[in-house]
Amino acid sequence: MNLKNLKVKEIDHHMNQVSVEEYMKYVPLLEKDERESVKKLGKRFEKKYEKFLEEKERVKKLWTYENRLISAGYKMIAGIDEAGRGPLAGPVVAAAVILPPNLFIEGINDSKKISLKKREALFKIIAEKALGIGIGIIDNEMIDEVNILNATKMAMKRAVEKISIPPQYLLIDAVNLADINIKQTGINKGDSLSISIAAASIVAKVTRDKIMDRFHRIYPQYGLIHHKGYGTKEHYENIKKYGLSPIHRKSFLKNIIGDRKNENKSWKL
C-alpha cells in the first residue's frame, strides 16, 4: 500500500477491509507517515489490535477446563447451561454444546453479560461452528409439578440426549446430573469460566427469548416481549390486571393467587 498516493479516508477504508491480524503490517507505516491525521489513524488501529490480542487471551483462558480434558483423552466435551430458572412464566430451556478444539469466538461470554444484538450474532456463529448442539425444554406445568431445580435438570438431560454426537464428558454450570452415564463436572459460574458452557448459555438464552417472543403474540397483554416472563413491575401489574395465562408458573405466584382468592375475585387459571 503506497500511503503517499492515498487520502486519509482511503487509508481508513482499506484498513477496515483487512482482518485485525493484518493490522500490524500497516500500523508502522501509518505511524511513520508525515501527515498527523495518518499517524493518528495508525495509533487507532494499533489500539484495536491490542484489544484484539487481549480478547484472544481472554478466550484462550476460557478453554482451560476443556483443554485439561482434551489432554486427558476426551474429545467430545459438552458444555451445558440453562435459561429461565427465575421467570414467572414460560419454560426453562437448557442447551448442550460441543465446540471444536481451541475455536476462537470473539466476544463469547456469559449470556447475561452480552447485549441482545451480540447474543444473536454469537448464536449464529456457535450454530455454524459447533460440532453438536442439543436443546431441552421443560414447560411451566412440569415446573409446577416437579419444582424448578428438578425441571432444570430434566431440561439439561434432554439437551444432552439431543446432541447428534454423544458427548464423552459434561461441563455443567453449577449443577450435577444424576442418572446419566457420562462423566461430568459442575462449575460454579461456569458460564464465565468455560467456553463450552458460555456457548450453551447463549444458545439457551436466545432460544428461550424466541419462545417468549412467540408467546407474546398469543398473550400480548403481559408484555412478554419486554421482560421474557421475568418478574418486572410491569409483569406483576399485568398479572394482577389480567390474571394468569396458561404459561404462568403457579408455584411461583402463590402469594398473588392467595391474595386474589381471599378477595373473592375471579382468577383466570
Image: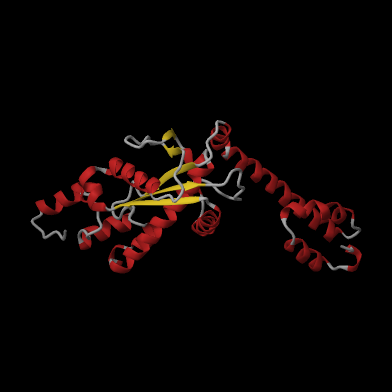
- Height in image: 61 above or below 1? above
Query: In the rendered image, which quarter is residue 9 located in?
Result: bottom right
Where residue 192 sits in the image (x, y, percent)? Answer: 51, 40
Looking at the picture, tell me which residue is in the foreground, 61 or 134.
Answer: 134
Where residue 245 sits in the image (x, y, percent)? Answer: 22, 60
Count the labels in the image. Answer: 0
Q: Is residue 50 left or right of residue 173?
A: right
Q: Is residue 215 left or right of residue 183?
A: left
Residue appearing at x 26%, y 61% in the figure: 238
**Residue 57 visible somewhere in the drawing:** yes
Looking at the picture, tell me which residue is in the foreground, 253 or 122.
Answer: 122
Q: Quadrant of the N terminus?
A: bottom right
Q: Residue furthest left?
A: 264
Q: Quadrant of the C terminus?
A: bottom left
Q: Is residue 226 left or right of residue 269?
A: right
Where residue 122 sits in the image (x, y, percent)? Answer: 54, 55
Q: Is residue 27 left or right of residue 178?
A: right
Q: Residue furthest top?
A: 72
Query: In the rendered image, which quarter is residue 170 located in?
Result: top left
**Residue 112 visible somewhere in the drawing:** no
Residue appearing at x 53%, y 51% in the figure: 130
- Height in image: 120 above or below 72? below
Color scheme of the displayed model: secondary structure
Where residue 47 sits in the image (x, y, percent)? Answer: 73, 49
Residue appearing at x 53%, y 43% in the figure: 195
